[in-house]
Amino acid sequence: MSKARIAVLVSGGGTNLEALLNAQEAGRIPHGEIVLVLSSAAGAYALERAKNHGVPGFAVPRKGRTQEEFEAGLTEKLTAYRADMIVLAGFLSILSPEFVGRWPERILNVHPALIPSFCGKGMYGLRVHEAALHKGVKVTGATVHLVNEIPDGGRILLQKAVEVLPGDTPEVLQRRVMEQAEWVLLPQAAELVAQGLAR
């Protein structure tokens, strides 16, 4: 059986990437293999994590480039490493409809809320948890969805609820959502899509 070749796109510290790499090493993504990590920021610690796990990692900086130039850089690396699917793991750049259209049902993203709550353009990182706390919800969580041309608009693959506790700050809530939901769901969803591609 040939495994689906997975590229992971990141922008920062790479905690979700670490969860994926650990899951792969524990045999929880049997139908896929992470073959490439691309970062939209040059100094992202995620690239260090990739190196520590023996996975090739490259910076394809977004800064100072047009969308076309940036996506051409991504495409060049994805093609060179024969990627079959893409996982967005804390990737902060919105991809164009043209780019997404070349990867139908093969790009997945993790969002730190239960879509359709607290999602869409401009809703990422701590902003999501600030909005959840501001609204006073008792339950939040994470969603892994397929990516289409609408931010956070693609088909939902998996969701997991996480309790909001009294006294939560956005930072504390963010950590709990990562640990209890994002790091659990992302490897599961990667395996789900890889399984379909490996058939």
Image (cartoon, grey):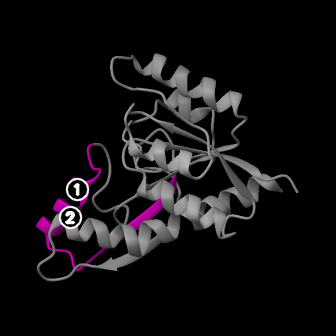
Q: Which of 187 and 67 is in front in this view?
A: 187
Residue drawn where x is 66% and y is 62% of the image = 191
Image position, residue 90 (x, y; %): 40, 49
Image position, residue 124 (x, y; %): 29, 50
How many discs mark residues in the rendered view?
2
Q: Is residue 158 visible?
A: no
Could you tell whether 162 is left or right of 101 in the image? Answer: left
Q: Which mark is residue 171?
A: 2
Quadrant showing the C terminus:
bottom right
- Circles 1 and 2: CB atoms closer than 8 Å: yes
The vertical placement of 4 against 56, above or below, is: below
Q: Mark 1 points at which residue?
A: 126
Residue drawn where x is 51% and y is 68% of the image = 185
Q: Is residue 138 magenta?
A: yes
Could you tell whether 26 is left or right of 61 in the image? Answer: right
Residue drawn where x is 40% and y is 45% of the image = 45
Q: Nearer the viewer, residue 61 or 132?
A: 61
Q: What residue type is labelled 2?
A: Glu
Residue drawn where x is 80% and y is 54% of the image = 198
Q: Which of marks 1 and 2 is in front?
A: 2
Q: Does the magenta stretch include residue 3?
A: no
**The magenta stretch spans which residues?**
122-146
Image position, residue 1 (x, y; %): 88, 57
Mark 1, Cα crowd under 10 Å, few <14 / some 14-19 / many 20+, is: some
Q: Which amino acid does label 1 sit on?
A: Leu
